[in-house]
Image (cartoon, rainbow, N blue to C red):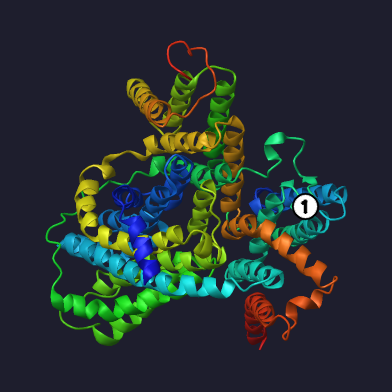
Amino acid sequence: MDLILLGFSVLLQPSVLMMLVLGVFVGLVVGSIPGINDNIAFAVFIPFSFSLPVEQALALMVGVYCAAATGGAIPAIMLRVPGTAAALLTTLDGNAMARRGHAGRALSIAMTSSVVGGILSALVLLICAPLLAQVALRFGYVENAALTVLGLSCVVGLLKNNILKGVISAALGLLVAMVGFSQSTGFPRYTFGNVNLIEGIPFVPLLVGLFGVAAALELMRDIVKERGDESAQTGLPKIGSMRLEGSLLRRLMPTWLTASAIGNFIGVLPGAGMLMAIYLAYDQAARRFRRRFAGQPGEPEWGQGTPEGIAAPEAANNSVTASSMVPLLSLGIPGNSTSALFIGAMALHGLVPGPLLFTQNSGIAWMIIVAFLACNLVMWPLAFVVIRLVSGTVFAIPRSVMVGVILLLCVLGAYSDGNNLFNVWVALVAGVVAYVMNRAGIPLGPAILGLVLGAQMEASFANSLLIARGDWLVFIDPVAHPISAAMIAVSALMWLAPMLGSLGRRIAKAR
Amino acid sequence: MSSSPSARWRNIDLWTALALIGVAAYAALQALSFDAGSRPFPLVVASVLGLAAVMQLVLSLREDPKAPLGSADLLPAGACVALMAGWATALSMGLGFGLSTFVAQLGFLALAGMRQPVKIAGVALLITAVSYTIFVLLLEVRLPRSMLQAIAPGL
């Protein structure tokens, strides 16, 4: 309890609270602009957060991260264009309800569901992260090495249809992580004689490129592709009343709980991502709707404006936000690529996420946790203000103006990390690589995790093998290192399950 | 196996696999020159990357490309990168933030389909002025020296 109060005492400083509110506002607006997602906002904000005190910088980041997923629902409902990928399924029932004259109701369901999901997820973070960090504090080199294997296996294994490309992505990330002086011997690796690479590829410009520049290139590609395909733009639906009746709130309660449970479970798995959560939650909500409400008078078809069709994906996507911070804060493993950007933001202030954060910087660690709770409370009233604002102004900004602005913000952000033009080149090259990876269907998540875990993985393996005198079996020794053995077993399952599944399907087909 | 030869050559999987094989081979060769303590991990990772890339190459030769790479995928992104590279080069040559940013924004707006010259110039000027005010005057980002340094820092 004292630690929670410690977190609140940091968060409730006026300047920190103001940054959280600003972050929520920016996140809602950014999320509501189609084509601009939370990754871009993060990529742009991280370098500039360096000039802020660490508490303010992280409060800003938490606000943006939480609110962007919620803001994505606004254009999904009003324009049938998801503001972020997390609002993909909200377009179906949300826009259908808006077109039937209940845009305000659809928006209100989306915002309320997001807040409910976000609060439940913040509670999961509040309970799980410190507990997991306590366990992780007992980890030695062997367990840490197994943990990095587990992290990468989760990300790659969950790709199911594309394990090969996941392996390529992870290996690329690990290779890039090795640029610079070797931690064990000080030998310069892959520096090409460039002094800027001696300490490794600068992390912030790299993230800015991978997320911001690549997204801007994608946006330009979409704009050019769609130029000749301008379908007649229909006017925005009228928002109308945003009041939700008590009976509807009671009806949505099971959907919120189920979707939040799914979102929280998916969120804590490294690399599982929001999309998986919203699809699973949407599917569960569809089953419940068909069982309880389908065919009743006044009830639309599934996908044609049902309240559950909006509530489930929105509660699930916001449940992922805070719960994806559980592995990051407690183990140093990002739950998804956006939460990986927190590592960059924290690194700028000399903080390293992981179990030691709770002992060395407990005020900051608990501030981040309670900020997730607070930002959902702030978001609920603010979202309704932003809905009116966005509908009137933001939707009017042409996308043609955005690409240049985003790219300029990205390169200036990269440059300002040390006022070095080399960083601009890093961001551009990283942007091109990420764009090509996107086009080739190579997922970015494993590469990010490889980048983050590369040094830790190498050092943990080297030290473990040194202590065990080169005995590789040390990692699966169930007596001396049961946690490591369990993690390696789960990792093996993550790799084998999709392969066995595919083999089973082939055998069944052959019969 | 039924795809036309031209579609196969436009298969992005094929080209990325070839590029990755090159990267892996280079990384492995470089790793061999590292000292004994720094060598094993990069060597293992480069080998895994190389093996995965070879498998990807084989798959790309066996399967039809799902969506062959077209000029629509490459040209807009390539032009954006060229504009930003030009911006960075101009900045390093001392042309200054104002002129470099204005020209780059003109390019972006034209590329994105804006056609009225006056509107393009106005929007580019506005973006340049606002970004200079925010980054240089408010956030105090120190830009490289420029030929208009006497008027305003970095301009």
B54 to the left or right of A411: right
Up-down: is A425 above or below A165?
Answer: above
Give the x, y percent position of residue B19: 73, 48
Give the x, y percent position of residue A432: 59, 42
Give the x, y percent position of residue B30: 83, 47
Farthest top residue in view: B150
Label 1 chain ID: B
| The one of A77 and A261 positioned closer to us in this rendering | A261
Give the x, y percent position of residue B40: 82, 58
Q: Mark 1 points at which residue?
A: B24
A305 to the left or right of A174: left
A193 to the left or right of A129: right
**Residue depicted at 44% across the width and 65% down the height:** A274
Q: Is residue B1 visible?
A: no
Q: Can residue A509 be seen in this view?
A: yes
Up-down: is A495 above or below A368?
Answer: below
**Residue depicted at 56% across the width and 67% down the height:** A331
**Residue depicted at 78% across the width and 59% down the height:** B41
**Residue depicted at 57% across the width and 40% down the height:** A427
